[in-house]
Amino acid sequence: MSAGCRIICPSVGALPETTHGFAREYSFIPDPKAHARHFARLLREELDQPWAGRPERCLEQQAYAAAHYDWSVRLIEWKAIIGALLHTRVGESRLSLNHGCLGAALPFGVRTR
């Protein structure tokens, strides 16, 4: 994303959230040959008309990636999550962490002090 490359991927797992609407997503196809054919068709379309005729999306994607996925941003979130985890123990009130894209909740049974 940081390089501005177009992403073509199935809409599975965290890919839709991670790509934040910049990827060309498609439904997963379990049959490998059918999946390859579908992906090849999407790739051909993308090569014929990059970014569906909106090449400025490349720059928007780069700006988004720089603002949200740069290590200077991620480091702050990871430090907050790790710090919260280091100050938790089992048996007390539930802690919920909401730090930007890494929004997370502690596993069931983990409690704050």
Image (spheres, rainbow, N blue to C red):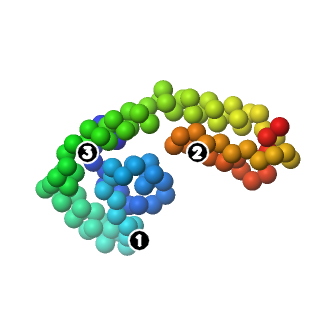
Amino acid type, callout 3: Arg
Viewer-side label of 1, 3: 3
* The furthest residue to the right: 91
> Do we see residue 47 in this rendering?
no
Instruction: State whether residue 28 is above or below residue 107.
Output: below
**For marks 1 and 3 on the same chain, the one whose residue lies earlier in the sequence:** 1
Which residue occupies the foreground of this view, 63 or 47? 63
Indicate the secondary structure of the residue bearing disc 1.
Answer: loop
> Is 81 on the left or on the right of 57, as rendered?
right
Amino acid type, callout 1: Pro
Residue indicated by mark 1: 30
Q: Report how far apart the C-alphas of labels 1 and 3 lie in the structure.
A: 30 Å
Numbered circle sitting on residue 103: 2
Disc 3 crowd, CA 10 A, few/some/many (<14, 14-19, 20+): some
Percent across and percent down for residue 25 are 34, 59
Picture quarter containing residue 46? bottom left
Percent across and percent down for residue 28 are 39, 67
* The furthest residue to the left: 48
Amino acid type, callout 2: Gly
**For marks 3 and 2 on the same chain, the one whose residue lies earlier in the sequence:** 3
Assign the N terminus to one quadrant of the image: top left
Residue at 74% across / 33% down in the picture? 86
Residue indicated by mark 3: 57
Disc 1 crowd, CA 10 A, few/some/many (<14, 14-19, 20+): few
Disc 2 crowd, CA 10 A, few/some/many (<14, 14-19, 20+): few
Residue at 49% across / 58% down in the picture? 13
Mark 3 touching mark 2, by CB under 8 A? Answer: no
Residue at 20% across / 55% down in the picture? 52
